[in-house]
Amino acid sequence: MKSKLFLCCSLLFFITSKAQNTIGTITNTQGTFNGYTLYAPAGHTETYLINNCGEIINQWTSTVAPGNAVYLLENGNLLRAGRISNPDINFGGVGGKVELFDWDSNLLWEYTYSTTTVSQHHDVFPMPNGNILMLAVTTMTEAEAIQAGRNPANITQGKLFNEQILELEPVGTDSANIVWEWNVNDHFIQDHDPTKDNHGVVEDNPQLLDINFLGNSAGNANWLHYNSIQYDERLDQIVISSRLLSEIYIIDHSTTTAEAATNTGGDRGKGGDFLYRWGNPQAYKRGTPDDQKLFGQHYPHFIPDGLDDARKIILFNNGFNRIPSVSQIDIITPPEDSEGVYSYTSGTAYGPINTDYTYKAAVETDFYSRILSSAQRLPNGNTLICDGDDGYFFEITPDEEIVWEYINPVTPTGILSQGDDSTASPNLTFRVLRYAADYPAFDGRTLTAGAAVEQNPDLTGCTILSTPESELADLSIIPNPVKNSISITGAISVDKVEIYSTLGQLIHSTQKRNIDFSNQRAGLYILKIYSDNKIMTSKIIKK
């Protein structure tokens, strides 16, 4: 007898009715992408990996709050920025250290980069070679800033922060070799004072940063506020976000440190100038306020290969200092002469003029996050969005239907109980990332769903949801129901078979077609069969 196989590639959870819930999972319907969501509540020492029902799959404990980014690595380790006190460098997003934990929350490595004149902040990024990119600031004295061409009238705090990216090679348990370095103060231009460094024509040099463009900084030391660095391995380029100038930039990573410090017109592989910039052409005197596209944006990054809109840039456009106060998700295609070489016409602003796609709420003013936040394209074409200053995570389909909603229950005063008002206390979240159920970090691990993050959770109706079934003529799974063992028969190849519990726990993985079920308890199981480039899923009942 033929088995009916689901054309879904993984398990899906859903909530039949969650209207009564005020925190945790609010909505989880058939269209959502199954996976595990990683987030680190601001101000707290915990990092959570949850399933779509909001149950904890894994949890990591640090001694410090996030500062700010966290990533789950393919080997199951957690890369995390941590916040330590620094009275000399103290602005939103300051961290000061980088931590690496194993799956069981054991601290493997930490690196402190925090003194009276330097500090890690906001983001880190795990490199394919095992190194770590780290975003940091270094301090320029007032005299150094003036010599670099800053207008003294626009130095309000006696110093200026230079933004820096370091590539760290971890050493031992608490050290690192700095193997690559980039500093934005190597790429300044100014037209204020011809007797000072970096003097030139700003509008003719878009590959350089005008040290006198203030954006929303009001002359403060923290005038750039880079809030994201994301690395693209295919191009060997880094995407940077400046919240206060409302611009994104792309720089080359294929350079040496010496080359990264040179000013050579932005040619790929020849220097550390901007290869591309977008969002606010006022910053290089090639636009007006009407030309501004970005407003305090976060998390710009290339959509990975294999996903919808691959190789385009997606970002959370906060709408900071825009009237009305409206956030949106934008996707753009940077114009290229060839891959990784960006088009620019002298005397104009960098394109594109319009986004490829923009998401706003049906009532636009209902969606606004002044700070923080992220957007991630998922393998099923959906988009996962983090409204950071509300601690509200939601997933939309390509038709902009909301199919999953979650409200972070962790606040500065503690963890809320189901039924509490989440708006009564801040529940900020910097960024949210979802990892597919077949992400390598989960291979061979027992993913037992624990309690929900919130207190007194209500998971009523959280169960397995099947998707529409269809016949696959060349495959049979017999017997079903099963008592002792099942056999997978048919002409197709079988690369791997996985057995999951109804909570998403991986129970067994094999390449065999005959599978012993005799030691499993009676109940419902999910069988995932990997064949060539397809993943097929079938329900199995154990008698």
Image (cartoon, rainbow, N blue to C red):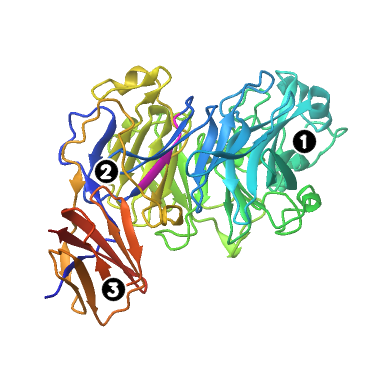
Give the residue type that dot 2 points to: Ile
Q: Which mark is residue 513?
A: 3
Task: Indicate which disc, 3 or 1, sits on the residue closer to the N terminus.
Answer: 1
Task: Give the CA distance from mark 3 to mark 1.
Answer: 72 Å
Q: Residue at x 17, y 36 (%)?
A: 460
**What residue is pinned by disc 1?**
191
Name the element at disc 1.
loop
Point 77% across, 36% down: residue: 191
Image point (53%, 41%), residue name: 291
What residue is shown with label 2?
A: 402
Image quadrant occupied by the C terminus = bottom left
Mark 3 to mark 2: distance in Å? 39 Å
What's drawn in magenta, residue-wise?
36-41
Mark 1 closeness class: few <14, some 14–19, many ≥20 residues within 10 Å: some
Three-letter amino acid code of the residue under disc 3: Arg
Name the spot of residue 352 as percent of width and height, x first.
52, 52
Residue 319 visible in rendering: no
Element type at mark 2: strand
Disc number placed over residue 482 in the picture, else none: none
Position of residue 493 in the picture relative to residue 204 (left or right): left
